[in-house]
Amino acid sequence: MNIWFATNNRHKKDELAAILGRDLKIPADEGYSFNPEETGQTFYENSLIKARELYKLLGKNEVVIADDSGLCVDGLDGRPGVLSARYGMENGKKLTSLQQNIMLLDELGDNSVRTARFVCSMALLLDNNRFYIVQETLEGEIVEKSQMRGDGGFGYDPIFFVPHLNCTLAQASADEKNALSHRGKAGKLIADLLIKVT
Ligand code: IMP
């Protein structure tokens, strides 16, 4: 049985494959172009939109997992939130992760409210009418600009300090990140569901 993951992000594919302990296929593996419009106002709406879009594209009974995730910063009233991937985007041109990190640190400035959380909503779609959605978080703090560090992970990891690990998420090993991350926790729930329902 193939398990498809509705993403174009190979980092996310590798993370989830490690969490589930199974191979995953993503649209790019089969040369599919996959660009769903993320029109939802919430993470869970967008995860279901992505799952349904890939299920339709495949045109057959396949198990599809989709996630929607992002960073919610309290000092920015929860932004960038569902727009995390598109933060700072202009005329359809996305910024690099480094540019997004610097922009966010500049926007937050010396605001003393630095608490933040990663959120991950994950949908498991079995067919058009059978699906499960879970949502999990990882709490942390946005570092000062001079404290941005680490080469691991992706996206906002270098600016996200995890008190429990006493380092940024980009300084954590893949195993450490997966053990406590928003995607790790959601993925483990989906792994249990997969065993029960497939
Ligand atoms: P999505 O692919 O639409 O879910 O976009 C999620 C965006 O949120 C990514 O492009 C990253 O910018 C950010 N993000 C989500 N999860 C993580 C993470 O684990 N580390 C760092 N950034 C993340």
Image (spheres, rainbow, N blue to C red):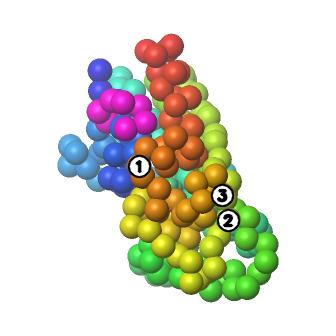
* First in sequence: mark 3 vs mark 2: 2
- To which quarter of the image does residue 97 belong? bottom left
Badge count:
3
Element at label 2: strand
Q: What residue does disc 2 label?
A: 141
The answer to whether residue 28 is magenta is: no
Given residues 172 and 63, the one toward you in this image is: 172
> Which stretch is magenta?
18-24
Tell me the kind of residue under disc 1: Ala
Measuring 37% from the left and 38% from the top, which residue is drawn there?
18
Q: Is mark 3 within 8 Å of ligand 1?
A: no
Element at label 3: loop
Proximity of marks 3 and 2: CB atoms separated by less than 8 Å: yes
Tell me the kind of residue under disc 3: Pro
Given residues 107 and 132, the one toward you in this image is: 107
Q: Please provide percent x and percent y for residue 135.
A: 64, 40
- Which residue is situated farthest in the front direction here? 166
Tell me the kind of residue under disc 2: Glu
Measuring 29% from the left and 27% from the top, which residue is drawn there?
2
The answer to whether residue 22 is magenta is: yes
Badge 3: how crowded within 10 Å, few (<14), some, or many (20+)?
few
Proximity of marks 3 and 1: CB atoms separated by less than 8 Å: no
Q: What residue does disc 3 label?
A: 163
Given residues 34 and 147, the one toward you in this image is: 147
- To which quarter of the image does residue 141 belong? bottom right
Query: Is 150 rendered above or below residue 179?
Result: below
* First in sequence: mark 1 vs mark 2: 2
Q: Please provide percent x and percent y for residue 13.
A: 36, 46
Given residues 99 and 37, the one toward you in this image is: 99
Q: What residue does disc 1 label?
A: 174
